Image (cartoon, rainbow, N blue to C red):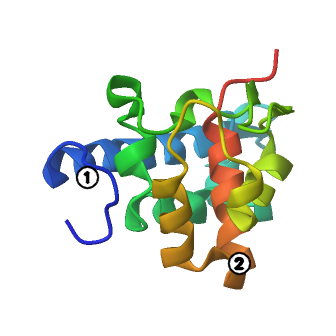
Amino acid sequence: MSGLLCNGPPLARSRQVAGSLLAATMLLLLVGCGASRGTSSQGSPVATEPAYIAEPFTHQQRLVEQGARLIVSDGCSACHLESVRRRLAPSFTSFAGHRLTLTNGRRVLVDEHFIREALLHPGDAQIRGYDPLPMLRAIMRLRLSSHPQQVAALAAFIEQIGPEPG
């Protein structure tokens, strides 16, 4: 299990969960992109290509898709998708959009800005109730401070799959 930091489930199950997450993310990108309808010369409706086929993805959609791939390939899914059962790390599915308490006592809203800063400066964003060492090691291993595009993609993905703001 090279690259995985958490003692989670077998690699096959982790890949299955990560694959499901990637598929769900792609579905989320496509939700709301329905087929547009035009009219023929006789005034009757004619189906045209759906917008997601005829138009390129937006910059934000590309970031989310890139982030989904990184979550799987970098091993983040091992701790952040199985955490509901093991409580190793906050689950991405319920992380963004919530307030949490850091080890220094500060309460923060988990939004895209916070996620970016936490990925760039993990020592300043240690979350109360979780061992910070696995995350610190992962960020050092991935050298995220040298890859701002990857940080932007990860933050976009994590923020996107969180719950809708209430």
Q: Splitting the image into 4 quarters, where does residue 87 fall? A: top left
Residue ID for mark 1: 15
Question: Which quarter of the figure is the N terminus placed in?
Answer: bottom left
Quadrant hosting residue 34: top right
The mark nearer the N terminus, 2 or 1, is 1
Graded by Cα atoms within 10 Å as few (under 14), some (14 to 19) or many (20 or more), the crowding at tag 2 reads: some
Pointer 1 local density, CA inside 10 Å: few below 14, some 14–19, many at least 20: some
Residue occupying the far bottom of the picture:
146
Does residue 84 sit above or below 33 in this rendering? above
Residue 116 position in % (x across, y down): 77, 58
Quadrant of the image containing the C terminus: top right
Which element type, helix, strand or loop, lies under badge 2? helix
Q: For the residue labelled by badge 1, is the local secondary structure a helix, a strand or a loop?
A: helix
Q: Nearer the viewer, residue 107 or 154?
A: 107
Q: Residue at x 14, y 48 (%)?
A: 10
Percent from the top left, x then y, of residue 24? 46, 39
Q: Could you say which quadrant of the image residue 118 lies in?
A: bottom right
Label 2, on which residue? 145
Residue 64, percent from left and from top: 64, 56
> Is disc 2 in contact with disc 1, using a CB cutoff of under 8 Å?
no
Q: Is residue 4 left or right of residue 61?
A: left
